Amino acid sequence: MSENESVTGLAATGPVATGPIRSAGSAPRTVVILFGGRSSEHGISCVTAAGVLRAIDRSQFNVILVGMTRQGATVLMREDDLADYRLEAGALPEVHDNGTRVLWPASTATQTITVIEQTGTLRSLGHVDAVLPMLHGPYGEDGTVQGMLDLVDMPYVGSGVLGSALCMDKHVVKTVLADAGIAVAPWRTVTSEQVAADPYLVESLDEGLTYPLFVKPARAGSSVGVSRVVAAAEIPAALTLAFAEDRTVLIESGVTGREVEIAVLEGRGEAAPRTSSVIGEIVFSGRDFYDFEAKYLGAAGVDLALPADVTDAEFAAIRDAAVRAYNVTQCAGHARIDFFLTETGPVLNEINTLPGFTPISMYPRLWEASGVSYSELITELIELAIEKRPAY
């Protein structure tokens, strides 16, 4: 076994993990896969859940599927419901209200969940060992669901309330990272109320920034509502698009550099975070930026170089900045951290606490290239959630 390989089979560039939590032959644990949600990333969440369902190790885990409708209702779903969930342009899947209602534990005294059937009958779904949230965007990735689960001490995969909320807000996280000495792209922040009160403010939003600019909602993901603008005349339309997702919008300077990504995974016990042993790069060939269509719908003009061609020094700089950012923002579980690799070093772009997790998404692909299969990664994340120390 190499010095960077943990006893759980996870390749790592950090300290060796402390080992498996369970002994061989233990009874399967029960996991809730929670997906859908109220955000504009609802359909991507559904596809992610379907990918996880297909890959999860059924010898180790029993699965309960809980879908969240666009109105926030939690419904019990069957595996057959997810069988046809695929990424197709204009036809992303959706959680529909089937009349059931899943109820979380009433207190910290139990980890049992129940369902109200369509007939009104109350039925126990049994003890749940952990929840695997696959909810992207607001009302799922921003600490909302994490706080709900914390109230009843239900273990869950991923960052807690603070880490989730902090990394979801692009303005706040950039402020924290910059204060910690981590390089970020120059930016300005504006709210819809400020623009309504002073329409002429739009004319000065590019002051001190470098074109091309990127206009993006403060609290949205998957490049939803993001525009690349090359002239001041394009800013009003970009603001309209971004304000449709969030009342707070960032205007960022474009950074000249390669777009690279690294995967971070919480360490076992008291061990430091681990990172993938390779870096991925977004390579553009006719597309302006890595937008929603390129990420999820297979649009042309973007390729993924995996592993990226970086020097040992460049890899070390990216890895060290990623681990530092992960710790500063109090992340837990998994995170994909995106950088611009410039001539003067890495500039952090975003921290994704619930990164894309379809089988073709960058986060699982980074670990797969590091020697960890999609199924093994899911197992490790669930075990980490169960092992996780109390938040307070």
Image: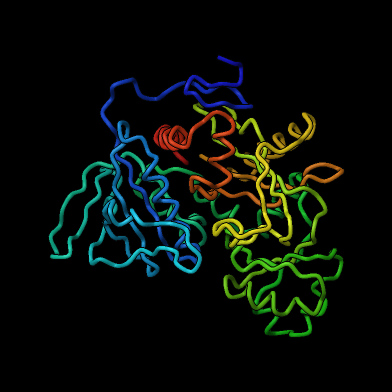
Residue at image position (65%, 40%) is 262
Q: Is residue 282 left or right of residue 207?
A: left
Picture coordinates of residue 267, whole percent (x, y): 54, 30
- Position of residue 358 in the picture relative to residue 323 (left or right): left
Corner quadrant of residue 121: bottom left
Residue found 45% across the figure and 55% down from its top = 135
Q: Which colour assignment does the render follow?
A: rainbow
Q: Position of residue 192 (x, y in %)?
A: 65, 77
Q: Position of residue 276 (x, y in %)?
A: 61, 33
Q: In this picture, is 253 found above or below 83?
A: below
Report the residue at 70% width, 54% height from top: 174
Q: Is residue 112 visible?
A: yes
Give residue 298's position: percent from left, percent from top: 57, 57
Q: Is there any visible trace of residue 389 in the rendered image? A: no
On screen, residue 231 versus residue 275, left or right, reads right
Q: State whether residue 245 is above or below residue 136.
A: below
Nearer to me, 161 or 14? 14
384 or 240, nearer to the observer: 240
Q: Residue at 56% across / 21% down in the picture? A: 5
Between 392 and 190, the one nearer to me in the picture? 190
Q: On the image, which quarter does residue 129 sit in?
A: top left
The residue positioned farthest toward the top in the image shown: 1
Count of picture labels: 0
Q: Quadrant of the N terminus?
A: top right
Of residues 117 and 387, the one drawn nearer to the viewer in this rendering: 117
Q: Is residue 29 above or below residue 300?
A: above
**Does 323 sit left or right of 211 as displayed?**
left
